[in-house]
Image (spheres, coloured by chain):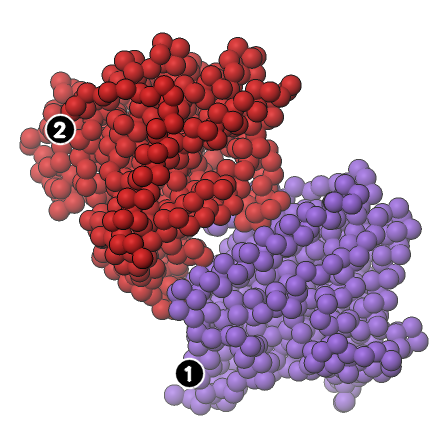
Chain colours: A purple, B red
């Protein structure tokens, strides 16, 4: 039996061998690497590769592929090369699938008509979602070398004609809003390597944020799609749970139903989020996944101004100045476009965090800690931190029931709270506009406040993340006079300075009521139009 | 502190006092009571009362009320009187709400326009569903005198204009397919007092079967709506879980999510089942119950012949001759009407029972047994029997997860099994036509085989029950040559003789895939039309 370091090295060796396939190789990179990686692609890619990977979203690329203005092989090579560069710059990959991808792309190019709606499009996949015929360690050293299990979403994407070309990093236990583990190590933010790309879909966040992917798959139980989308300035969507299939993900605590995670995409454009939902649901996945409600993706439109509630803070931790500025800019634009903008009252969000953090580990973390102990790999600080949240313990069945009742009572209270927004003017709030995180991407190991995302997992509300702006040293000065309200607020407040956060994207979140996924996406479109964005807008790289 | 007998007597005293309100009183009943109670109403009610309670379903009565051909007070008095008679004949009530009901009916009659779609209609409610302002013991002596909690379905029905006029019996623990407890005692079948009305909504079953209600509310986690509907020859519908609100029901193990119960109606006509779903969902209950999927009741119609699969048996216990005859008669009628009729292959139904029976009591029955011990009331044989099913035990969190995984694997297998029915002819099975129970209503304390209903709770498939025929001593002779396949089959086989089951209704069940509730109801209509029934058909009294 290897010790854990040797086992872990074997996974890195596997990854590094996969990167040597890159043809032509990327070449010598600057040492040290620049703080902001976004200057690298133009230098290290061919002009055509740069154009293909820089200028388009998935929708445009699919159009070009369909019209045969572009072969899947050419496109796939370009993204393979940019993903390789992303790996060198941010350490976001667990594996480059060069040969598989080229073979697949050539096959697709050989067909006389498109295989499906994603014909020829390269798609990146979070490692623990698995991959047919490949191993899946799910960030645990103990699981290195163990096979993937079938993943229906992967299968739908594949059968829709996509090309899988790389797999991306996730943190130990996947219960971190960052991206570090004892196998492939720390992923950094492409905009500022001193900052975290977020997590747990942090490899996807960094890759999409760097332009190494236009369509990546993540999963979210506490913010794991939305936080990395936000930290890297790209789009992300967490559907209501049980709307798209969930199985295939390797993780501990399988069978736990206290909070339900969901898969979802990280993309370069808003419309790609809609595309994802449409492609998945058109295949009627409820025919084999009986957890799902049988409903196609059914876009809605508004024939009236929206009522948008702005969550300036959650009553516990005050977001950093750039987040407040983003909220102000977007809400001003919405108001100017004729929408009603009101303040959101955050109902007992501190209690909500207490409930959801206890719901995450009804076994007190035993299953996760045992798996970490099994290999002897170290318990990383942020894994330890989340498992040691106050009140987390191994529950008896009766204690579990009591906690589920607490959750359900809170959910019902929140539903009533939302419905009550119609009391004054007869118009219910359509969506909440809120921070995704209490600041832009923080320095590594500082993501210790989940409630801006986890709140909506507890409530199982759908949420879409969109890029708004960047930290601006002139506009976003530190509020020196601010008096923190509590320890958490103090920690967050002290994290911030414009210098530390230089280059960081600032993103926001649109939240809707449970199962109103289409409404969230429609509202995001309305909001972005108010911001002056048309359908050509995409996340800046 | 009273001993349990005194406490229990206090609940019977309360019930008996409520019955003395009946005006005029029912008068002297035959002693002993006849085997079949259905001859009583004509003798003990006025001609008008008999007509009103005997000849119509809820839809017709609502039409008469709307057109003011009938006052709610007159109708309510008629049902109060017939319910009182039902109580004397079958012991189905826990309480007659004479004064409340008359006051409410008069109020409704005083309005210049209908309050809602159920304006003036008397509706009966299973006791443990609660009732505003009244106590709720949920069949436990320990809970006698404890208040009801809010019940959204009750509230919707009330706000739609109904009159609550009585509350009905349920068995100890509500986990029996019969209806006996230590408070109000044994409910008997109106068609044959030696037989059980079924359970757990057994009071409703007996009451609706006797004609004392046209619209009663029950709940179902293992057959508790469908079994009593079937045993008493009336209609019943168990929706997919989380389609209508669930809260308000008092029971042990609240917070348990392993198998989700659902409320649903027992009625005299098929269309009343649709009416229930429509009335409830029109109020958008998902606005306060975030568990629900936001979807109105959306009736479907077929523009092609159905493919109906007949479950002749479940591979474990062979249904009695009258059930087989009913399956044959109905499937012949469907075939004659041009529908495709095939055999259903029951996939691992024995394993399914093992899973679902363990899922019912993940605490090994502790919560339920403790509550029974608290008062000192005896543990009844059928309560003991269900808690002592093989494998039932108090689970650790990890064992609970493993059992939930077992459940989910089985559900996925069953979904694939259903989808595979399209393999040969390209047409998937629309619905399964199956027995609700392995025989007509059995003698008391013999309901020891749940899988014909519980199978569909495990899978969370919607199911509608409809009356087909009655046990016929000529057609339904005992199969003397039958060799039982196993102990359960032997027990069931030996239960049957046409003499013992004389008068018993024979009903069947239509089952659809999860969340295809509207399809089940549409298929039932198609099936009944094939049987020669038009919209005027209603359960025979």
Q: Residues within 10 Å of mark 2 (few under 14, many from 20)?
A: some
What element does badge 1 sit on? helix
- Residue corresponding to mark 2: B500
Q: At 73% across and 51% down in the image, what residue appears?
A: A431
Q: Which is more toward the observer, A222 or A53?
A: A222
Q: Residues within 10 Å of mark 1 (few under 14, many from 20)?
A: some
Where residue B87 appears, as percent x and y from the top left, is 30, 29
Marks 2/1 same chain: no
Eyeballing the image, is B173 above or below A491?
above
Image quadrant where residue A95 sits: bottom right
Q: Which is more toward the observer, B299 or B281?
A: B281
Where residue B370 appears, as percent x and y from the top left, is 31, 60
Where residue A406 appears, as percent x and y from the top left, is 53, 61
Residue A378, can we see it?
yes
Residue B305, can we see it?
no
The quarter of the rendered structure image containing the N terminus of chain B is bottom left
Where residue B62 appears, as percent x and y from the top left, is 51, 19
Q: Residue furthest left?
A: B481
Q: At 52% across and 24% down in the image, what residue appears?
A: B105
What element does badge 2 sit on? loop
The quarter of the rendered structure image containing the C terminus of chain B is top left
Image quadrant where residue A44 sits: bottom right
- Any mark on residue A374, and which? 1
In the visual, does A179 lie left or right of B304?
Answer: right
Label 2, label 1: how far apart the Cα atoms are: 63 Å
In the visual, does B407 lie left or right of B475?
Answer: right
């Amino acid at each position: 039996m290897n010790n854990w370091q040797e086992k872990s090295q074997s996974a890195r060796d596997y990854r590094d061998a996969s990167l040597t396939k890159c043809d032509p190789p990327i070449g010598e990179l600057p040492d040290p690497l620049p703080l902001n990686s976004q200057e690298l692609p133009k230098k290290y890619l061919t002009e055509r590769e740069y154009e293909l990977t820089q200028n388009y979203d998935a929708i445009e690329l699919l159009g070009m592929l369909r019209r045969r203005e572009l072969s899947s092989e050419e496109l796939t090579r370009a993204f393979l090369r940019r993903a390789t560069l992303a790996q060198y710059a941010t350490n976001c990959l667990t594996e480059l699938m060069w040969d598989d991808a080229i073979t697949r792309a050539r096959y697709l190019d050989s067909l006389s008509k498109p295989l499906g709606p994603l014909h020829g499009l390269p798609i990146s996949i979070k490692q623990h979602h698995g991959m047919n015929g490949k191993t899946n360690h799910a960030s645990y050293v103990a699981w290195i070398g163990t096979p993937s299990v079938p993943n229906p979403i992967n299968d739908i994407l594949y059968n829709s004609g996509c090309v899988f070309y790389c797999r991306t990093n996730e943190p130990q236990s996947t219960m971190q809003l960052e991206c570090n583990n004892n196998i492939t190590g720390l992923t950094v933010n492409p905009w500022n390597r001193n900052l975290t790309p977020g997590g747990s879909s942090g490899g996807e966040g960094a890759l999409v944020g760097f332009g190494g992917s236009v369509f990546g798959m993540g999963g979210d139980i506490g913010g794991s799609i939305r936080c990395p989308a936000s930290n890297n300035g790209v789009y992300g969507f967490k559907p209501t749970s049980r709307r798209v299939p969930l199985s295939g993900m390797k993780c501990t605590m399988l069978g736990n139903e206290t909070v339900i995670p969901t898969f979802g995409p990280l993309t370069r454009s808003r419309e790609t989020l809609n595309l994802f939902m449409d492609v998945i649901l058109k295949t009627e996945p409820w025919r084999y996944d009986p957890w799902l409600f049988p409903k196609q993706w059914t876009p809605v439109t508004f024939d009236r101004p929206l009522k948008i509630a702005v969550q300036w803070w959650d009553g516990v931790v005050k977001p950093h100045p750039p987040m407040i500025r983003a909220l102000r800019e977007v809400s001003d634009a919405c108001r100017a476009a004729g929408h009603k903008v009101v303040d959101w009252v955050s109902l007992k969000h501190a209690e909500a965090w207490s409930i959801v953090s206890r719901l995450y580990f009804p076994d007190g973390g035993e299953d996760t800690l045992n798996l970490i102990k099994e290999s002897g790999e170290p318990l990383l600080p942020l894994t330890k931190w989340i498992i040691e949240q106050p009140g987390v313990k191994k529950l008896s069945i009766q204690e579990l029931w009591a906690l589920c009742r607490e959750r359900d009572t809170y959910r019902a209270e929140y539903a009533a709270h939302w419905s009550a927004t119609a009391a004054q003017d007869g118009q219910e709030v359509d969506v909440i506009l809120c921070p995704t995180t209490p600041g832009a991407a923080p320095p590594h190991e500082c993501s210790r406040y989940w409630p801006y995302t986890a709140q909506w997992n507890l409530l199982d509300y759908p949420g879409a993340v969109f890029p708004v702006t960047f930290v601006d040293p002139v506009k976003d000065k530190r509020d020196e006079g601010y008096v923190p309200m509590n320890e958490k607020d103090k920690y967050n407040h002290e994290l911030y300075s414009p210098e530390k956060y230089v280059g960081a994207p600032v993103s926001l979140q649109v939240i809707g009521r449970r199962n109103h996924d289409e409404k969230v996406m429609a509202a995001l479109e309305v909001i972005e139009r108010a911001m002056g964005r048309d359908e050509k807008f995409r996340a800046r790289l």
